[in-house]
Image: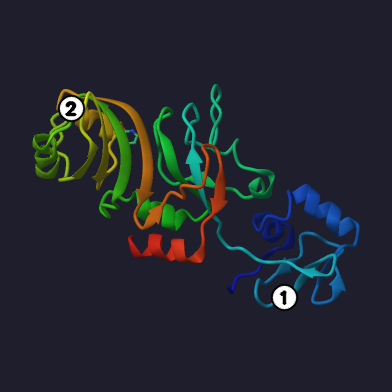
Amino acid sequence: MGERQRLDKLLGNSGYGSRKEIRNLVKQRRVTVDGHVVNDPGIHVEPGVNRIRIDDIEAVYKKFIYIMMNKPGGVISATHDKRHETVIDLLPEEFSNFDVFPAGRLDIDTEGLVLLTNDGQLAHEILSPRKHIPKTYYVHVNGTVTDKDKKAFSEGIVLDDGYNCLPSELDIIKSSETSEVNLTIYEGKFHQVKRMFESLGKKVVYLKRISMGGLKLDPRLEPGQCREITDQELNALKNNC
Ligand code: URA
């Protein structure tokens, strides 16, 4: 743990309320540090060394938080937007005091796995183009997807701007007028999945991210729902970076 921080900032970052709410808790003499009632919300404390209690219940210090969301269509994977709802707007009250941001973007009409975190280092690793973190999408495509397409994906699709995609893996679930596939890609160019299919003359009509690195979207999460990821899931994600 190690570094000293302002008490109000530490409690705020750990989900105990806004700075103002924490100042009020202090005013109401409900916060103690090492058994002494705190009068100044700005005192410096050291997580793991000083014992912080609120209403006599030990405060749990969280350095970082990691939330998996099933992003619905129509919502932007950004922190602010003037016109549309964002993934941050969808966060329930319990997460509203954490300064999280989405680690990576999905198009407005794409659904599925978005990781929201305040861990800038992990987000950077996930997004680093050098890391080639696999991302798997469940896709509905207008047109019959065939083994010939599978081969084209495995050899590397060339996009409309001449960019040579890395080899990717196509699993055909259903091949008919509207086909269903899972596609795993190892990079994240703008509208990449849609453009890959366009290169083969096919149109993506539904797109959902179902995994990113070692993290799989919890199928129990309805669109718009989210939950903190488990330690196991976090390890799986970190092991893939
Ligand atoms: N590829 C796309 O085309 N859109 C997304 O949202 C993600 C990957």
- Which secondary structure, mark 2? loop
The image's colouring method is rainbow
Where does ligand 1 appear, by image quarter? top left
Q: Is residue 68 left or right of residue 129?
A: right
Residue 53 lies in quadrant: bottom right
Q: Identify which residue is drawn at 36% across, 58% down.
A: 214
Estimate the x, y position of residue 164 in percent, counting from the top left: 13, 38
Q: Residues within 10 Å of mark 2 (few under 14, many from 20)?
A: some
Residue flagged by tag 1: what amino acid is it? Asn
Q: Can you say which quadrant of the picture contains the N terminus?
A: bottom right
Asked if marks 2 and 1 touch (Cβ < 8 Å), the reply is no
- Which secondary structure, mark 1? loop
User: Mark 2 or 1 closer to N-term?
Assistant: 1
Q: Identify which residue is drawn at 85% across, 65% down.
A: 55
Q: Is residue 160 visible?
A: no
Q: Residues within 10 Å of mark 1 (few under 14, many from 20)?
A: some
Numbered label attached to residue 121: none
Numbered label attached to residue 144: 2
Q: Is residue 155 above or below residue 237?
A: above
Q: Nearer the viewer, residue 45 or 14?
A: 14
Measure the C-alpha gap from mark 2 to mark 1: 63 Å
Q: Identify which residue is drawn at 49% across, 33% down.
A: 72
Q: Which residue is mark 1?
A: 50
Residue flagged by tag 2: what amino acid is it? Thr
Q: Identify which residue is drawn at 38% across, 45% down.
A: 210
Estimate the x, y position of residue 30 in percent, counting from the top left: 87, 62
Mark 2 near ligand 1 (CB under 8 Å)? no
